[in-house]
Amino acid sequence: MTGVYGEVSWFCCGSSWGPCGTAGHGACGTCNSGSYQHAWPNTSDACHAITNPEACGTSLSRRGCGFKHYTTNRCTGAKIGTTIADCGPQTDLFCGETSCCGSVCGSNRLIDLTPAAFSAIASLSNGLRPAYVDVV
């Protein structure tokens, strides 16, 4: 597998869960905060036009709703498989943003996990973690 280094964050969608109230069900219509799902910046032409990951020097493969990615928290080695349920994060708004744990750092948001998925690999209070995302 090949992948890309960057940051992982979390977001709320769908039914109320943990720190989230009720929200929309995302670009795919299936997103739920309590499920192992994620938002990906290149799910469609319209999504890519909004997120523009290339502005940060990152080229991300086009993947549609339901595609499974594996995200590894580089601080702990914890890994989770999640499926695409939304468009995001808006990568171009976070160019140069960096999160670190010790000497391990990641820059530029690549993927937003639902709270359930993020909490399986890190504490929600961390908000951001250096990550590796398998993109094949």
Image (tube, grey):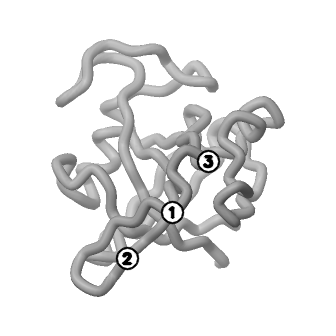
Task: Give residue 135's position: percent from left, percent from top.
Answer: 65, 65
User: What amino acid does circle 1 point to?
Assistant: Gly
Dot 2 falls on a residue whose secondary structure is strand
Residue for badge 1 = 96
Task: Give residue 125's position: percent from left, percent from top.
Answer: 16, 48
Marks 3/2: CA–CA distance: 19 Å
Q: How many marks?
A: 3
Q: What residue lies at 36% left-to-right and 43% top-to-bottom?
A: 10
Task: Give residue 41's position: percent from left, percent from top.
Answer: 64, 45
Q: What residue lies at 36% left-to-right and 76% top-to-bottom?
A: 74
Q: Which numbered disc covers residue 92? A: 3
**Residue lying furthest bottom in this view?**
103
Dot 1 falls on a residue whose secondary structure is loop
User: What amino acid does circle 3 point to?
Assistant: Asp
Marks 2/1: CA–CA distance: 12 Å
Whether residues under marks 3 and 2 lie with C-beta atoms below 8 angstroms apart, the answer is no
Residue for badge 2 = 105
State which quarter of the image contains the N terminus: bottom right
Task: Give residue 90's position: percent from left, percent from top.
Answer: 57, 40
Dot 3 falls on a residue whose secondary structure is helix
State which quarter of the image contains the C terminus: bottom right
User: What amino acid does circle 2 point to?
Assistant: Cys
Marks 1/3: CA–CA distance: 9 Å
Q: Is residue 23 left or right of residue 1?
A: left
